[in-house]
Amino acid sequence: MKRVIYTILFLLFFIQVNFAGEKKRFYQMSNREIDSLITAVAQKSMTVTEKMNFFSQFFLGTDYSFTCVGDGKDAILETYPLVNFKQTNCMALCEHVLALAISDNWDNFFNNLQQIRYKQGMIGMRTRNHYTMADWLPENRWLLEDVSDKIGGSGSKKVTRTISHSNFFKNKGISDLRHVIKDRKITINYIPSADLNKIKDKLQTGDIGALLFANKTDIFSAHMFMIAEIEGKLIIREASTSKMSTFDTNYEKWTEKIKGSNRYIGITIMRVREQINQPGSIILPWEIEKIKRNSDK
């Protein structure tokens, strides 16, 4: 009986977002509506990346805000909400979509989101995964893997930069640096901008990309985006200041713009791990620590 009810709910939502081309976005929904949608989709035999493609479309048209999320109303510095479906930015979009795709209700989505955004899910400025390549990806290696070298093949390159959390936090007005990671050099693989059209056939729906600065020595990522698909066509789905919104761009059109800019050197691609990206896959927040231990073996 429950399965029948969930199927009906899913169909109702599917009709709601597709009827006559009208799409009700997340920013137009209540939390209860979103909870019902999460629960209904979780009953479907969809892979995590298929659910990412599905859920991410509900963010289209959402206003961009650099301060859309923070450490909650009780924080000392950034008192922005821990969850926000009314506004988004490039990293928040990817975090929300990932958490939605591995969850089966609102509560588990909320907690999975904090596990993705913070080290061990511990909410705070010092434990937030601020740097995409230095913090965010390493802390989420239980869920994602860097496939830039695999996709780029012989054309992939390496870049090394020094990441300074102490400078980052000092600029935030934080003087207590006792629990801050020490400065460190990090080397990553990337796919040069000139090769972006060559790798198109190797990209997959649900891949998350980071666009890398060309002339920085203390940071890698300038922007995050997602690979999505509509009617078999590959697109870039992103929240960006260029339109102050969340929108889709044809892959070739997007890459031509990147190749024509001296600001960027290329991209890295992060992919949901195969063992997690299975039909009907759901991750409960209290299972993540075990998954992390197993992934480190």
Image (spheres, helix red, strand yellow):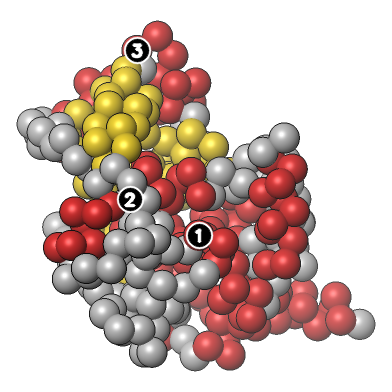
Amino acid type at mark 2: Tyr
Residue drawn 41% across the image and 49% down it: 135
Label 2 Cα crowd, 10 Å radius (few <14 / some 14-19 / many 20+): some
Where is residue 279? Give x, y as percent. Answer: 75, 50
Amino acid type at mark 1: Lys
Q: Earlier in the sequence, mark 2 or mark 1?
A: 1
Report the quarter where the C terminus lies.
top right
| Residue 256 appears in the rendering | no
Which residue is label 1 attached to? 119
Q: Earlier in the sequence, mark 3 or mark 2?
A: 2
Which residue is label 3 attached to? 155
Look at the numbered discs 3 and 2 and tell me whether their residues touch, using CB distance below 8 Å.
no
Q: Earlier in the sequence, mark 3 or mark 1?
A: 1
Amino acid type at mark 3: Gly
Which residue is label 2 attached to? 131
CA gap, disc 2 to disc 1? 12 Å
CA gap, disc 3 to disc 1? 33 Å
Extreme-top residue of the structure: 154
Secondary structure state at the residue bearing disc 1: helix
Q: Decide: is 165 above or below 153.
A: below
Residue drawn 26% across the image and 80% down it: 77
Report the quarter where the N terminus lies.
bottom right
Front disc: 3 or 1: 1
Where is residue 255? Give x, y as percent. Answer: 24, 34
Q: Hey, which quadrant is residue 28 in on the image?
A: bottom left
Secondary structure state at the residue bearing disc 3: helix
Where is residue 164? Give x, y as percent. Answer: 25, 46
Q: Hey, which quadrant is residue 166 in on the image?
A: bottom left
Look at the numbered discs 2 and 1 and tell me whether their residues touch, using CB distance below 8 Å.
no
Q: Decide: is 98 above or below 262.
A: below
Residue drawn 86% across the image and 81% down it: 2
